[in-house]
Image (tube, helix red, strand yellow):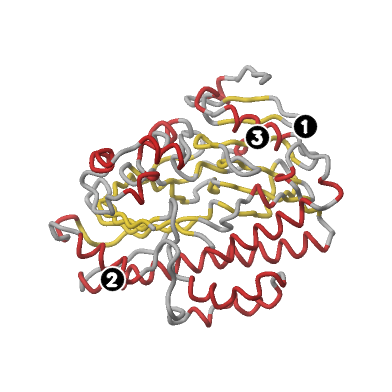
């Protein structure tokens, strides 16, 4: 049974901050408990029962059931890390760039631009026939030979997948802000090699003696000072760098297509953020390893990106450095139903209705990405007013999906 704690007015501020009792530490949730599925609450309690967890577990307002660890969870550990608390798409995140273009500069139809983007940037399971120019010279390949033996055979694939979008909830968008300025935004991760690294290490962790009595073996951890931890950290940080470079290559390819259509376009410095990753940080005067699975860092004054869904708003935000959230915020709207449930529920007419005004695919292949399969992004933002403040509201007018 979940035990609720009374909240002070300072803690609640104007948000819905809930708290449940865990096995070792408590869980603080930036959402009403009624908005969180029971399975996710049980999962959060399992995380909070791990002996290495520090202070408390923070759950963002978009949290929902995940594999092992909850999507939208922030976990600080002392001398340990759980690969499942990072997720399988290591380093997944976003990049956003404002341009000098205005809505009036764009053609009436964006179909030609979408076609050009899809031709230049492989999506889904596709990748470049040959590596994009400059990818082979990236510094990250110098340490590739030190990755776990099981992924050495993936180098050529990883080279060709650098600069590709992937599928699922990954996207490339052209957006407008309140002043009708044109923005470019994209969401992608570490592709197949990141997934492979994650699965290899999760499997290794499950076999370790100290993980045999855990409430959920998917939460298995590596301990500091061990060879297993050393190898995982190396592979993990490599994959995080690969994901970042992947987004940078995609953004360069995207900008090339924009330049071909708009010769005078200029691009501002990108805003970049991971939301599936590990960082060495100090919280409550302790050095800890923080895993953010479906959460962005929101340190005081730090810029971040919180997307909605294919047909709703997204936000450029500035972190408020809230200590209780380990200086974190949500990574998006968060799913309110599984992909399978969405495919069973929605019909073709729902696609046309929910994506009206957005230049994008409108076939059954994206039906599980419809806005109704996600939580209301504006409710999510309201629930985290003490974590971030909105800098810019964006609305997509073009969306490329895998």
Residues at marks 1 and 3, CA–CA distance in whole angstroms: 14 Å
Q: Which residue is mark 3?
A: 43
Q: Which mark, by number, is residue 24? A: 1
Pinpoint residue 275: horizontal percent, then vertical percent: 54, 51
Q: Which residue is mark 2?
A: 257
Q: Nearer the viewer, residue 111 or 262?
A: 111
- Mark 3 or 2: in front is 3
Q: Nearer the viewer, residue 346 or 204?
A: 346
The reply, left or right, for residue 34 in relation to residue 207 is left
Residue in view at x 69 percent, y 44 percent: 76
Residues at marks 2 and 1, CA–CA distance in whole angstroms: 52 Å
Q: Which one is earlier in the sequence, the residue at label 1 or at label 3?
A: 1
Quadrant in which the C terminus is drawn: bottom left
Q: Residue furthest front?
A: 344
- Seen in the picture, residue 53 relative to 231 is either above or below; the reply is above
Q: Nearer the viewer, residue 214 or 56?
A: 214
Q: Which one is earlier in the sequence, the residue at label 3 or at label 2?
A: 3
Using the rendered view, name the quadrant where residue 126 is placed: bottom left
Asked if labels 1 and 2 touch by Cβ distance under 8 angstroms, the answer is no
Residues at marks 3 and 2, CA–CA distance in whole angstroms: 44 Å
């Amino acid at each position: 049974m979940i035990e609720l704690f009374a909240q002070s007015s300072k803690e609640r501020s104007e948000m819905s901050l809930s708290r449940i009792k865990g096995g070792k530490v408590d869980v603080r949730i930036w959402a009403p408990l009624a908005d969180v599925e029971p399975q996710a609450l049980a999962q959060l309690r399992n995380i909070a029962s791990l002996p290495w967890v520090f202070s408390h577990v923070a759950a963002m307002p978009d949290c929902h059931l995940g594999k092992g660890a909850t999507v939208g969870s922030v976990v600080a550990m002392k001398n340990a890390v759980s690969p499942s608390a990072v997720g399988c798409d290591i380093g997944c995140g976003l990049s956003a760039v404002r341009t000098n273009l205005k809505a009036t500069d764009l053609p009436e139809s964006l179909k030609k631009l979408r076609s050009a983007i899809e031709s230049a940037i492989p999506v889904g399971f596709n990748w470049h026939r040959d590596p994009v120019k400059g990818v082979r010279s990236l510094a990250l390949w110098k340490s590739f030979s030190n990755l776990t033996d099981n992924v050495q055979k993936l180098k050529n694939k990883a080279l060709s997948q650098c600069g590709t979008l992937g599928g699922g909830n990954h996207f490339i968008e052209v957006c407008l802000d309140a002043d009708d300025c044109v923005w470019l935004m994209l969401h992608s991760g570490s592709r197949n090699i990141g997934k492979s690294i994650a699965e290899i290490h999760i499997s290794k962790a499950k076999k370790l003696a100290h993980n045999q009595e855990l409430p959920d073996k998917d939460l298995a951890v590596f301990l500091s000072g061990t060879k297993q931890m050393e190898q995982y950290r190396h592979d993990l940080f490599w994959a995080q760098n690969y994901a970042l470079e992947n987004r940078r290559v995609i953004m360069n390819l995207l900008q090339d297509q924009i330049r071909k259509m708009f010769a005078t376009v200029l691009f501002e410095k990108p805003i970049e953020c991971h939301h599936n990753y590990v960082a060495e940080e100090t919280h409550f005067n302790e050095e800890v390893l923080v895993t953010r699975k479906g959460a962005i860092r929101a340190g005081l004054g730090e810029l971040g990106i919180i997307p909605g869904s294919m047909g709703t708003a997204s936000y450029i935000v500035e972190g408020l450095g809230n200590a209780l959230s380990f200086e974190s915020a949500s990574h998006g709207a968060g799913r309110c139903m599984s992909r399978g449930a969405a495919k069973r529920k929605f019909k073709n007419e729902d696609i046309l209705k929910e994506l009206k005004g957005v230049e994008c695919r409108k076939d059954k292949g994206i039906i599980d990405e419809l806005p109704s399969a996600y939580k209301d992004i504006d409710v999510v933002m309201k629930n985290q007013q003490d974590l971030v403040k909105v800098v810019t509201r964006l609305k997509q007018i073009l969306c490329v999906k895998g």
